[in-house]
Image (cartoon, helix red, strand yellow):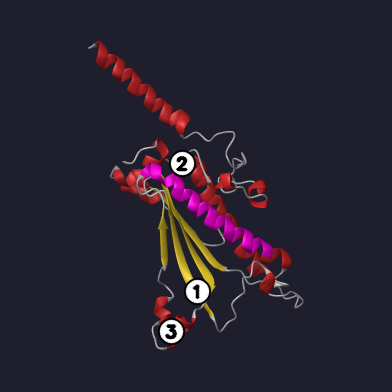
């Protein structure tokens, strides 16, 4: 009986630790996050975007990893809207800004409600946002987040030949070409999240250069040639962050 009591106390303490220590946002992250309480604007500081560091892509908690993923998605949305507003300006003197990102959509939901068969709560937890609406940064209990990126890339000669022989291009434009998921096995999500953060950050930095220079020398920027209208294709990339948020939060492989 004594051993059972001790084991029960240790188990209770471990549960408290998982709630109040493991996943409480730290005051010091590998990559600085601001403390803004606004549900939409809390997240990465400008230091992260201006001075990229390899350590910034890594996280020590699920909450930190999620804030980075969602915040980067929100910044990409801001860039797409900024470029669109610039190009739609009737001034006539502005040079068109062409980003490699055409559209950003996002969705999040709390998987815990569905696993507990609480479908009304699950449905109310779903938050879908278009490019004009930032995603809520602060997480719920076990939130899965998804970004759908529509990207402009150069078309290869093989693709040109195939597309010329294919009459179903209008149907293909709705297909998802690449899916990258992190956290399928919970704790393993930290490396997957770091990969996603680096990918999103590199897209952000490329867009930032194009926005700052108004594409004055697009052919000289990182040797990336902006596709012309006759050799560009649109590709969709789906990023799923924390397939098993419970395991990622509690450093376990199971949900």
The residues tagged by marks 1 and 3 sit, at their Cα atoms, a distance apart of 12 Å
Closest to the observer: 167 or 125?
167
Mark 1 / mark 2, whichever is N-terminal = 2
What residue do we see at 54% from left, 54% from top? 198
Where residue 247 appears, x then y in whole percent?
Answer: 37, 40
What residue do we see at 58% from left, 82% from top? 229
Q: Is residue 37 visible?
A: yes
Which residues are the magenta region?
Answer: 186-209
Residue placed under numbered mark 1 in the picture:
234
Where residue 114 appears, x then y in whole percent?
Answer: 32, 47
The mark closer to the camera, 1 or 3, is 3
Image: 150 above or below 120: below
Mark 1 element type:
strand
Mark 1 / mark 3, whichever is N-terminal = 3
Reply yes or no: does residue 189 show up in magenta: yes
Return the mark for residue 163: 3
Reply yes or no: does residue 60 show up in magenta: no
Closest to the observer: 132 or 77?
77
Asked if disc 1 and disc 2 are in contact, CB closer than 8 Å, the reply is no
Where residue 31 appears, x then y in whole percent?
Answer: 59, 43
Q: Residue furthest top?
A: 2
Image: 89 above or below 28: below
Residue placed under numbered mark 2 in the picture:
62
Mark 3 / mark 2, whichever is N-terminal = 2
Main SS of the magenta part reads helix
Q: Residues within 10 Å of mark 3 (few under 14, many from 20)?
A: few
The residues tagged by marks 1 and 2 sit, at their Cα atoms, a distance apart of 32 Å
Image: 11 above or below 57: above
The residues tagged by marks 3 and 2 sit, at their Cα atoms, a distance apart of 42 Å
């Amino acid at each position: 009986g004594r051993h059972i009591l001790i084991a029960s106390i240790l188990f209770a303490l471990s549960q408290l630790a998982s709630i109040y220590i493991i996943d409480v946002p730290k005051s010091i992250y590998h990559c600085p996050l601001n403390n803004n309480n606004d549900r939409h604007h809390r997240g990465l500081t400008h230091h992260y975007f201006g001075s990229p560091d390899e350590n910034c892509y890594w996280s020590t908690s699920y909450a930190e990893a999620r804030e980075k993923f969602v915040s980067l998605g929100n910044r990409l949305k801001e860039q797409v809207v900024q470029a669109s507003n610039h190009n739609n300006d009737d001034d006539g003197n502005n040079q068109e800004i062409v980003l490699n990102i055409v559209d950003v959509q996002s969705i999040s939901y709390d998987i815990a409600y569905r696993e507990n068969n609480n479908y009304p709560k699950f449905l109310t937890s779903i938050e879908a946002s278009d490019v004009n609406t930032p995603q809520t940064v602060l997480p719920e209990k076990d939130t899965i987040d998804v970004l759908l990126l529509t990207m402009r890339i150069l078309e290869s000669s093989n693709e040109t030949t195939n597309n010329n022989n294919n009459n179903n291009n209008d149907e293909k434009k709705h297909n998802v070409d690449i899916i990258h998921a992190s956290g399928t096995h919970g704790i393993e999500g930290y490396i997957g999240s770091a990969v996603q953060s680096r990918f999103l950050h590199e897209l952000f930095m490329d867009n930032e250069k194009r926005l700052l220079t108004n594409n004055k020398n697009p052919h000289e920027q990182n040797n990336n040639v902006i596709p012309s209208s006759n050799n560009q294709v649109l590709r969709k990339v789906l990023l799923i962050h924390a397939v098993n948020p419970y395991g990622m939060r509690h450093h376990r492989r199971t949900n």
